[in-house]
Image: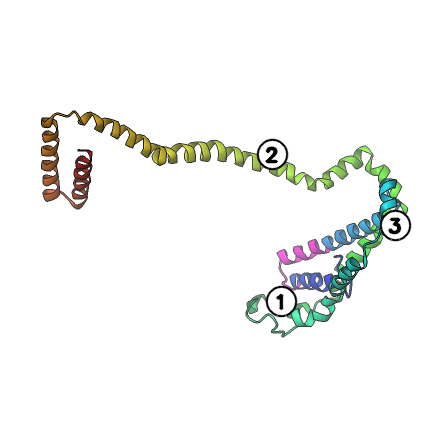
C-alpha cells in the first residue's frame, strides 16, 4: 500500500507518477506533486496504523485480550498464498505489463502515440524519479517517531482546543460531507420533491396521463348514459346526424378529418 521498493505497490504507483510528470504540462506536474504528497500521507497513516496496533499498549478490555488468539493453519495458509503474490508480482511482471514494447495488452488497451509518454519517463531526472520514494520514506519515519516516542504528547495536543478543531476538521474529511449534504444534496432533493415529483410526476403527467384519462372516460360514460332514454326518435336523431357528419367529413375533409370522423362514428355506434 505504501509503495515501497520491490513491492507491488511501488511499481504501479511509481510509473503513474513518472508518466504523469513526463507529459510536461501544468496539469500533469500538479498531479505529480499531488501524488507525491499522497505518497507521504499514505506512508504516514500506514505506519501509524502499524504502530498503534502492534507497537503500542493495547486499549481494549481485559476479557477480549485474554480470549484473543491467532488464526488456524488454514487461515495462515490462505493469507500466505495471497501475501506472496501481492509482494512480488509487481517485480516479476513489471516488464510484462508496462515494459517498453510489450504487446501483452494487445488491442485491449489502446493509447494514441501522442499520449505515449512512458518513453520520456525513462529520461527524466533521477531526483524527480526518487522524490515520491523519499516522500514515502520520510512519511513513514515521521509517523513512526511521533507515535512511538511522542504518542502522549500527540494525545495532549489532540485534546486541546486548537487540536480538537483541527482533528475534527480532518477527521470529517474537511467537512466535505456536511457542506455537500446541507448545501447541495438537500436543496436538490427539495427541488426534486416539491417541483419535479409533486408538480410534474404527480401533477402534470398524472393529470394528462392515467388519472386524467380515467376521469375523462368516466365523465363521458356518465354523459352517454343520458342518451339511452329508451325513445326511438332519440336514437334516430343520433344515427342520422352521425351518418350525415361522417359522410361530409369523410368525403370532403382532409386525411386527419377523415380519421376523426371515423373515430366519432365508431364511438357513437358503440354507445348505441
Residue ID for mark 2: 182
Q: Helix or strand or loop: what does disc 2 sit on?
A: helix
**Within the image, what quadrant is residue 166 found in?**
top right
- Compute the Cα span from label 2 to label 3: 41 Å
Q: Is residue 189 left or right of residue 157?
A: left
Give the percent coordinates (x, y) of residue 55.
88, 50
Q: Point out the residue furthest to the right here.
A: 149
Range drawn in magenta: 22-36
Q: Helix or strand or loop: what does disc 1 sit on?
A: loop
In depth, the one of 234 and 6 nearer the eye is 234
Residue ID for mark 3: 55
Visible in this render: residue 134?
A: no
Q: In this view, does 238 lie to the left or right of 167?
A: left
Asked if the magenta segment contains residue 31, the reply would be: yes
In depth, the one of 197 and 119 nearer the eye is 197
**Classed neighbour count for the residue bearing mark 2: other residues with Cα under 10 Å, few (<14), some (14–19), many (≥20):** few
Amino acid at each position: 500500500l505504501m509503495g515501497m521498493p520491490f513491492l507491488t505497490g511501488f511499481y504501479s504507483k511509481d510509473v503513474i507518477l513518472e508518466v504523469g510528470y513526463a507529459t510536461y504540462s501544468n496539469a500533469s506536474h500538479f498531479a505529480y506533486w499531488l501524488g507525491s504528497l499522497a505518497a507521504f500521507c499514505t506512508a504516514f497513516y500506514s505506519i501509524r496504523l502499524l504502530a498503534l496496533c502492534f507497537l503500542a499498549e493495547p486499549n481494549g478490555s481485559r476479557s477480549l485480550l485474554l480470549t484473543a488468539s491467532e488464526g488456524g493453519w488454514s487461515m495462515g495458509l490462505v493469507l500466505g498464498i495471497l501475501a506472496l503474490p501481492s509482494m512480488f508480482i509487481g517485480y516479476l511482471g513489471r516488464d510484462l505489463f508496462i515494459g517498453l514494447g510489450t504487446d501483452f495488452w494487445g488491442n485491449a488497451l489502446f493509447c494514441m502515440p501522442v499520449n505515449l509518454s512512458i518513453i520520456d519517463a525513462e529520461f527524466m531526472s533521477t531526483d524527480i524519479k526518487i522524490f515520491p520514494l523519499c516522500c514515502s520514506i520520510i512519511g513513514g519515519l515521521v509517523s513512526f517517531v511521533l507515535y512511538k516516542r511522542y504518542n502522549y504528547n500527540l494525545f495532549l495536543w489532540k485534546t486541546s482546543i486548537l487540536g480538537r478543531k483541527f482533528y475534527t476538521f480532518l477527521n470529517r474529511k474537511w467537512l466535505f460531507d456536511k457542506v455537500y449534504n446541507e448545501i447541495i444534496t438537500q436543496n436538490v432533493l427539495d427541488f426534486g420533491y416539491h417541483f419535479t415529483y409533486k408538480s410534474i410526476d404527480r401533477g402534470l403527467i398524472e393529470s394528462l396521463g392515467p388519472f386524467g384519462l380515467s376521469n375523462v372516460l368516466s365523465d363521458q360514460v356518465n354523459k352517454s348514459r343520458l342518451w339511452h332514454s329508451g325513445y326511438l326518435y332519440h336514437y334516430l336523431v343520433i344515427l342520422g346526424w352521425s351518418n350525415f357528419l361522417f359522410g361530409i367529413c369523410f368525403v370532403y375533409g382532409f386525411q386527419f378529418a377523415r380519421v376523426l370522423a371515423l373515430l366519432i362514428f365508431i364511438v357513437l355506434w358503440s354507445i348505441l
